[in-house]
Image (cartoon, rainbow, N blue to C red):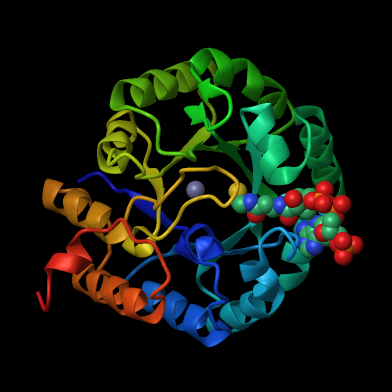
């Protein structure tokens, strides 16, 4: 049986798209539920400017509560700059996702930095915190809302300075859900071929109902670390048209049925997704299972 590691990113990628502030207790209740359902890797927040993403204003408090409650869990957080990395480290986070967009215009819209400035900022983080594990989140890997389609010919040269600069983990993000399975296969095979030592993750949005096929396509190319969000809550506040992520419980159901080993309690996940949709009525959810099942 092949093992797949699920990286739940709902408390960051999902929550950040809900305009109304979600009370801290609600966020913690959902994080607790995810851990109870068997999730081990959890992106619980982002250390970003509260002006850019007000929902994440409680990052420090939320992180310290979660780490105190669940010292065994693998928590990580998204950071856009050195200041975010410093806050993450001070809160007890051991590894971070450093986000850069393959398209310069989306990088400007999201992080307000040129490619060169983003690269320089990463160097500053690496120099300041050499012990910190950093995953490069490559947003708009497959396409950008402003620049259109991206291919492996864009991805490979872009990654080179990062790999040369010590990045060992890259998360290929389909920020606007524009990829197709053939493109996913081609991109992953090209990246694996060019940088065989890289540890790859995949992060696919379900905007065009292709989240599942694209994620499966990545898994069949050998990617075994997969990101998704409970209930398919998600989007990107800086990418027009981006909507929900692939739903973790739907993905877990499919993979379990196919014989993959996950260690996830699907019933608990489905019930939690339903519970979450009640708690966050303003959320946009792309999940299916939680809508069609009562008690399983
Ligand atoms: N955490 C908290 N506050 C931060 C911060 C961080 N990591 N980085 C910057 N700030 C604050 C600054 O103190 C400043 O506050 P002030 O206006 O009260 O003085 C303000 O944010 C602007 O700082 P500046 O350095 O000029 O940044 P900017 O305006 O160029 O914004 C980012 C750049 C990266 C901080 C901002 O665009 C951001 O946080 N983006 C995150 C986007 C995101 O989360 N996208 C979704 C995930 S992919
Ligand atoms: Zn995303």
Residue drawn 36% across the image and 63% down it = 230
Q: Using the rendered view, name the quadrant where residue 65 is placed.
A: bottom right
Taking depth in this image into account, of 289 and 2 the one nearest to the observer is 289
Q: Residue furthest top?
A: 153
Residue drawn 71% across the image and 74% down it = 60
Horizontal side of 131 relative to 242 (left or right) equals: right
Does residue 129 appear anywhere in the picture? no
Q: Quadrant of the C terminus?
A: bottom left
Residue 124 locus on image (x, y percent): 86, 43
Residue 240 locus on image (x, y percent): 52, 43
Number of marks drawn? 0
Residue drawn 55% across the image and 74% down it = 20
Residue 72 locus on image (x, y percent): 51, 73
Residue 278 drawn above or below residue 131: below
Q: Using the rendered view, name the quadrant where residue 205 is placed.
A: top left
Residue 133 drawn above or below residue 293: above
């Amino acid at each position: 049986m092949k093992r797949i590691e699920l990286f739940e990113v709902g408390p960051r990628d999902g929550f950040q798209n809900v305009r109304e502030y979600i009370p801290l207790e609600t966020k913690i209740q959902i994080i607790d539920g995810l851990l109870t359902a068997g999730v081990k890797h959890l992106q619980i927040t982002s250390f970003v400017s509260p002006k850019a993403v007000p929902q994440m204003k409680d990052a420090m408090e939320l992180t310290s509560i979660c780490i105190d409650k669940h010292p065994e869990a693998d928590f990580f957080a998204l950071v856009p700059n050195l200041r975010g990395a410093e806050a993450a480290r001070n809160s007890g986070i051991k590894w971070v996702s450093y986000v850069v967009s393959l398209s310069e215009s989306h990088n400007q819209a999201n992080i307000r930095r040129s490619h060169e400035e983003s690269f320089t900022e990463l160097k500053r983080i690496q120099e300041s915190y050499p012990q910190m594990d950093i995953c490069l989140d490559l947003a708009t890997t497959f396409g950008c809302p402003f620049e259109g389609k991206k291919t492996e010919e864009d991805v490979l040269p872009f990654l080179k300075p990062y790999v040369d600069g010590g990045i060992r983990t890259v998360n290929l993000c389909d920020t606007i859900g524009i990829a197709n399975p053939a493109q996913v296969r081609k991109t992953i095979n090209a990246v694996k071929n060019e940088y065989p030592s890289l540890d790859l993750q995949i992060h696919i949005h379900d905007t065009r109902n292709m989240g599942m096929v694209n994620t499966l396509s990545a898994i069949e190319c050998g990617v075994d670390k997969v990101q998704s969000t409970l209930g398919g809550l998600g989007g990107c506040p800086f990418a027009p048209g981006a909507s929900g992520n692939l739903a973790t419980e739907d993905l877990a159901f499919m993979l379990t049925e196919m014989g993959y080993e996950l260690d996830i309690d699907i019933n608990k996940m489905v019930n939690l997704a339903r519970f979450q949709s009640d708690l966050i009525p303003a959320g946009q959810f792309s999940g299916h299972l939680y809508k069609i099942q009562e008690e399983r």
